[in-house]
Amino acid sequence: MTASPTPGGIAARLAETACVNHPFTLTDGTRLSAYFDEYRLAANPSLLRDTARAMVSLIPDETEALAGIELGGVPLVVALSAATGLPASFLRRLPKRYGSRRQIEGADITGQRTVLVDDVVRSGGQLLAMARMLRVAGAPVSAAVCVLERPLGGRKLLAEQHITLHALLTEEDLPAQRAGDAA
């Protein structure tokens, strides 16, 4: 088995590939001068694979399933599922309006200790909403993993709801010239 990439090596590669120095507006209207482009990460097969391999160590031992949040968490959860052998589910922010009309797709994770997967965590609100949805559906959630954590209160908010956040990188881990105020 190939050794997991080091977070430092991944940080440089992620900064080079996915940190974009260009104006970006968050959903709350906040404007940033730079952002983390999860699509650039997902579009780079070797970087996605290596990022997932580096994230494997963040997954708690008792984990039975993974759940990726649309859209940035979906390619990550697929790669993590392949790297860990754990089943994956895919979470929509809103139920599908046609077809299955589901909000949770993929593996049946009812009763399985599930870890949430997302690309970037800021305030933690989206992860918390998804954790509540999974808990109502019968999937216990006590942990979440992400590629990049921004220090905007997400860790604290999740901890208040008994969810431990495990981040591969924080802004401080990214090379300064590319990180900016990456979303």
Image: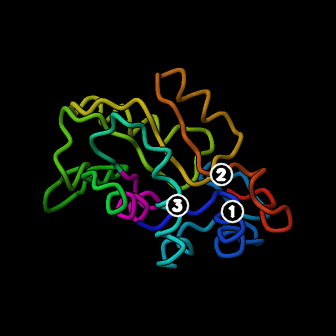
At label 2, the amino acid type is Leu
Q: Which residues are magenta?
A: 68-80
Of all residues, the one furthest to the front in this rendering is: 1
Q: Which mark is residue 4?
A: 3
Image point (54%, 36%), residue name = 165
Q: From mark 3 to mark 1, how far is it between C-alphas?
A: 13 Å
Q: Position of residue 124 (x, y in %)?
A: 55, 38
Q: Nearer the viewer, residue 55 or 120?
A: 55
Q: From mark 2 to mark 3, how far is it between C-alphas?
A: 15 Å
Secondary structure found at label 1: helix
At label 3, the amino acid type is Ser
Residue 161 left/right relative to 34: left
Image point (68%, 46%), residue name = 150
Q: Is residue 3 magenta?
A: no
Q: Earlier in the sequence, mark 2 or mark 3?
A: 3
Q: State the image quarter where residue 36 is shown.
A: bottom right
Q: Quadrant of the N terminus?
A: bottom left
Secondary structure found at label 2: strand
Q: Which residue is disc 2 drawn over? A: 169
Q: Position of residue 96 (x, y in %)?
A: 24, 56
Q: Which mark is residue 11?
A: 1
